[in-house]
């Protein structure tokens, strides 16, 4: 069945619209997570190792999801890794202060 001429321009725009609807790569989220994990490392590795390790593992999972172009999963895991790293750092600083 032939496509009417009036519908043809709309069909040609569909790939463009689909590209616009796709989520953007979570570059900023991954960068923030990496920074938080790295910043927490010195104190957290000594005083909150399990919490820091969990953050590092989520960051690794986010990096793998990013490599697989699974932006939603990468974004969610990167955000979780950042929060976990900040928690590990806060917990470690509290533990270090109590140990003095």
Image (spheres, rainbow, N blue to C red):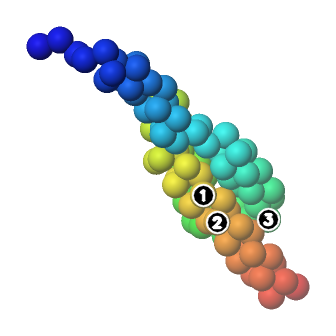
Q: Which residue is mark 1?
A: 79
Q: CA distance from mark 3 to mark 2?
A: 16 Å
Q: Residue at x 31, y 15 (%)?
A: 5
Q: Which residue is mark 2?
A: 83
> What residue appears at the point 44 percent right and 24 percent down from the top-left corner?
13
Q: Secondary structure at mark 1?
A: helix
- In the picture, the quarter occupied by the N terminus is top left
First-in-chain label (1 vs 3):
3
Between circles 1 and 3, the one closer to the viewer is: 1
Please indicate whether residue 25 sits to the left or right of residue 86 in the image: left
Mark 2 residue crowding within 10 angstroms, few (<14) / some (14–19) / many (20+): some
Q: Residue at x 75, y 81 (%)?
A: 95
Q: Earlier in the sequence, mark 3 or mark 2?
A: 3
Q: Secondary structure at mark 3?
A: helix
Q: Is residue 21 above or below residue 7?
A: below
Position above or below: 23 against 3: below
* Of 54 and 35, the residue lying toward us: 35
Residue sitting at the far bottom: 98
Q: Which quadrant is home to the C terminus?
A: bottom right
- Identified at 80% across, 76% down, the residue is 93
Secondary element at image label 2: helix
Give the tally of numbered discs: 3
Q: Quadrant of residue 52?
A: bottom right
| Image location (x, y in percent) of residue 72 | 47, 47
Q: Residues within 10 Å of mark 1 (few under 14, many from 20)?
A: many
Say which residue label 3 marks. Answer: 43
User: Gap in Å between the C-alphas at discs 1 and 2?
Assistant: 6 Å
């Amino acid at each position: 069945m032939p496509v009417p001429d009036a519908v043809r321009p709309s069909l040609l725009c569909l790939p463009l619209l689909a590209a616009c609807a796709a989520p953007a790569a979570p570059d900023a989220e991954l960068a923030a997570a990496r920074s938080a994990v790295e910043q927490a490392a010195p104190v957290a590795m000594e005083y909150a190792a399990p919490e820091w390790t969990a953050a590092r593992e989520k960051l690794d999972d986010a990096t793998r999801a990013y490599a697989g172009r699974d932006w939603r999963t990468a974004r969610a895991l990167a955000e979780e890794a950042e929060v976990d790293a900040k928690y590990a750092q806060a917990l470690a600083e509290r533990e270090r202060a109590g140990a003095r």
